[in-house]
Amino acid sequence: DRGTVIDFKNGVWEKGTYTGRPMRFINFAALNHHSTYCGATSAVKNFLGISDLSGGPDPQDRGKLTDGYYNFHSFPFNKWAPGPAAGMLGAEVGFFMKTIRSADLNITTAEWIGLASRVDPPVAKTQAVLASTDPVALDYHSFKYVLYPNSGIKVHNPDDKKSPVRQDLRKCAEMGGGEFDEKYVKVESYDFAKKAIQNDEDLVVHGERHWGTKAKAIMKYLYLRYAASS
């Protein structure tokens, strides 16, 4: 707007110089399933969508920008089937936070959450909004207490050592992207239905499940829930 350009690291650029004007960066994400190699998408993975996607998401197919440089989204991948190396996506985002910019506030919307997709039912109507200055702590909480209790899919469980969400969040935290251990995180939760602050044992949010009408999408969920998680 008004002819300004925003540089994530250095702020507002206008009339040939950085102005030094205050800038706030709000990371606004949704909570959904996102593939077996990422597990889920929310605040941390949302960073992949704020940067240049020139060349597409795959480094082997136009994702390379020049020489040994790849766009931010394609960097952790090695073709689609194998997916990224364990934790590499989280480490990449953590490095971005440390060297470029982290968000001043992270907000995750979970009015509806996709149990096996970002666009199709089955979904759960969890009617939750979560926010934190720490994206790692926010994702850990939203995966453990909102997504996983409703999906039952192991890749959504941040306490499962083999789950991609755990590996990505842990690596992001190691890069300085946030706090992975929930015992160091204070959670304040308000239940608008009960009009009361929740205790720790009440943090799990269960939502009404809606299956939709697409047989393929329903079969995908059932496979992820029972076959792939066994």
Image: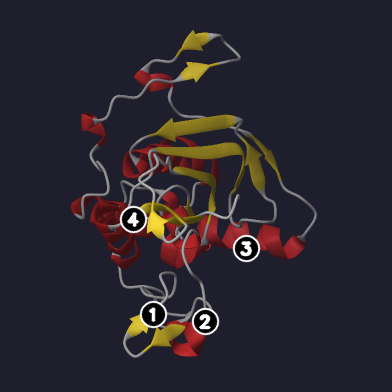
Which residue corresponds to mark 1? Answer: 70
Outermost residue, front side = 15
Residue 183 position by quadrant: top left
Q: Earlier in the sequence, mark 1 or mark 3?
A: 1
Is there a contact, CB below 8 Å, between mark 2 and mark 1?
yes
Q: Earlier in the sequence, mark 2 or mark 1?
A: 2
Q: Residues within 10 Å of mark 1 (few under 14, many from 20)?
A: many
Outermost residue, top side = 195
| Left or right side of 20 for 119 | right
Taking depth in this image into account, of 64 and 186 the one nearest to the observer is: 64
| Left or right side of 15 for 30 | right
Q: Does residue 230 appear in this view?
A: no
Q: Residues within 10 Å of mark 2 (few under 14, many from 20)?
A: some
Mark 4 or mark 2, which is nearer to you? 4
Mark 1 or mark 3, which is nearer to you? 1
Q: Earlier in the sequence, mark 4 or mark 2?
A: 4
Which residue corresponds to mark 2? Answer: 55
Is there a contact, CB below 8 Å, between mark 1 and mark 3?
no
Q: Which type of secondary structure does the marked residue at label 3 adopt?
A: helix
Q: Which type of secondary structure does the marked residue at label 1 adopt?
A: strand
Q: Which type of secondary structure does the marked residue at label 2 adopt?
A: loop
Is there a contact, CB below 8 Å, between mark 4 and mark 3?
no
Figure label count: 4
